[in-house]
Structure formats: structure tokens, C-alpha cells
Amino acid sequence: METMRIAVIVNMVAPYTTPLFAKLAERPECELLVVSETLMERDRAWAPETGLPFEHALLDSWTVDLAPLAIGSGFKTRFDTYFYVPKRPLAPLRAFSPDVVVGGGGGIWSSPANIAALAARRWRDWAFVPWWGSFSRPRPTLPRRLAEPWVKTFMRASDAWLVYGTRQARDAVELGADPARTVIAPITALAPEQMPERPRPERAGSTRFLFVGRFIERKGLDVLLDAFGRVGGGELWLVGDGPQREIVEAAAARDPRIRALGHLQGDPLEDAYQQADVLVVPSLYEP
């Protein structure tokens, strides 16, 4: 059986991508290398995973904060606007010698590792495929408008395109992707083959709502707290941490129905999911 050697560049290996990459690595027709630009993004609270079930290379990178350039974003705080400059971005790719390099992560067109992989493909004889999760805003920020010519060049120079969904597919084609070589590949956790038993919590008439995520503006916490304040009864559990922690803790102090549980990981996080009735995802946008 002929095998394909695939290298995937990501910002970091996130917990929800580990099962996806593990399944890909198990396929006999695939040899996989995952290259991450950083071990853990600084606004993430969980511990890095160890013993990954696939080949993994960690780049030695500098972190560049772009928050001052987030002009016109509409957010008061920008907590995740940075990119990574690796010292030797092509070293693991040269050693692995892939057939195709998939450029993933946030801001793929501005990632030095992705740009280097795209530029090197002609003499290294690998294909380059961006894994596109961005989307166009009605009013793009000034830096994004200035970058538009480069983004179109980046997209048109690629060999094929993976996109998170139909919205991203439309945007990728508008930027120059070939619809015939554009494939929807959601970046999502894989459902288990058999769903685990979930005992129903025994509570008298109280619906428990659960939020899990970073306490940052684009997660929509202010919308969630305002909406819950208009609901009679019920409980709201908030799991996470971040720059809006004080807002969450103040809401919990005012309303006894709200519990701020902080960052949870492992069994305590699983228990929170088990004990909830409704998972709420109020994000203003997500990839």
C-alpha cells in the first residue's frame, strides 16, 4: 500500500485535536508529523499533554504580541493576538520529508512557519495546503485590510485547501482558492465510538447551565450573564479563567444561582459536564 507522508503545522496541540491526529496516525496509508509552534499558548490554563500518540516536533519560537495592532476589532481587550517566530521553522520538515504540509492554527497566512513551508515547497517538492478557519468580517480591522493583497497571494499559491465549514469555503474561494480542490474538514473533537454512561443528576426542578471556556470578551460572557439574569430559577456554573474573571466573580457574588468554579482539568472538569443539564456556548464568534 502506498503511503502519504503528511506534516501538520499548528500553533499548539490542543486537547480536542489529539484524538483527531491519533486516528489519522493509525491509518496504514498515512505517516503523520505534527509540528507545533509553541508548547502552550500563554492564555491557556491547562497543562500541556505528554506522551502524544503520534510523531510530534516542537519548534523553538519567540512570541510576538500583536494586541496594539488590533485596531478596529471592536473588543476592549485582545488576549489572543500574537504569533510565533520559530528559529528554525523548516528543520523538522526537512528531516521528515513530507509529501504534503498542512498549514493550520490561527492566523495561518501570518505564521512564519507556514510562510516558510509555502516558500520552500518548490525546491523541497512537497504540496502546501492551508487549513482555513478564518472568516471575513463586515468591517475588517485596519491591519487585516492592509494584509489583504498578501492573504490573496498566500491562498492562490497553495495547492489545495482544507476549510472548517461552508462559511470558510466561501471566503477561501473569494480569496482565490479553487472550489474543485477545496474540502471541508472541520477541526473538531471526535465522538467516542460508544458514548459513556451519563447518570442524570437528581435535582428538584432546577436546570443547571454550564459554560466552559476562557474568560475573554469574544466568548460572550457579558451576553450570557445578562441573559441568565432575566431567567427565573436555574443554576449557572462557569468554568474557566482569564481577564474577565472579576466580572464573573462579581456576578457570582450578586446572584447565589451563579457559581464561578475557576479552571478545571481532568476528572473535576468531567464531573462538571456530568452534573450539567445544558451546555451554553455564547461565543460572539468561533472558528
Image (cartoon, rainbow, N blue to C red):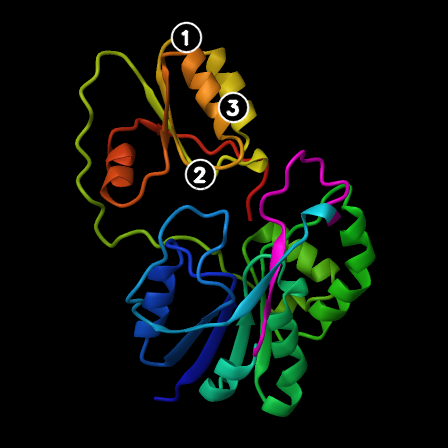
- Span shown in magenta: 69-88
Q: Magenta stretch mostly in which secondary structure?
A: loop
Identify the image quadrant of residue 152.
Answer: bottom right
Count up the numbered dots.
Answer: 3
- What label sits on residue 232 in the rendered view? 1
Q: Earlier in the sequence, mark 3 or mark 2?
A: 2
106 or 31: which is nearer to us?
A: 106
Q: Which mark is residue 247?
A: 3
Where is residue 49, by image quadrant? bottom left
Residue on which disc 2 sits? 213
Would residue 255 be found to the left or right of residue 147 on screen? left
Label 3 amino acid?
Ile
Q: Nearer the viewer, residue 63 or 16?
A: 63
> How far apart, in angstroms, are the residues tagged by discs 3 and 2?
14 Å
Cβ–Cβ under 8 Å for marks 2 and 1: no
Q: Quadrant of residue 148?
A: bottom right
Which one is closest to the eye, mark 2 or mark 1?
Answer: 2
Badge 2 marks a residue whose secondary structure is loop
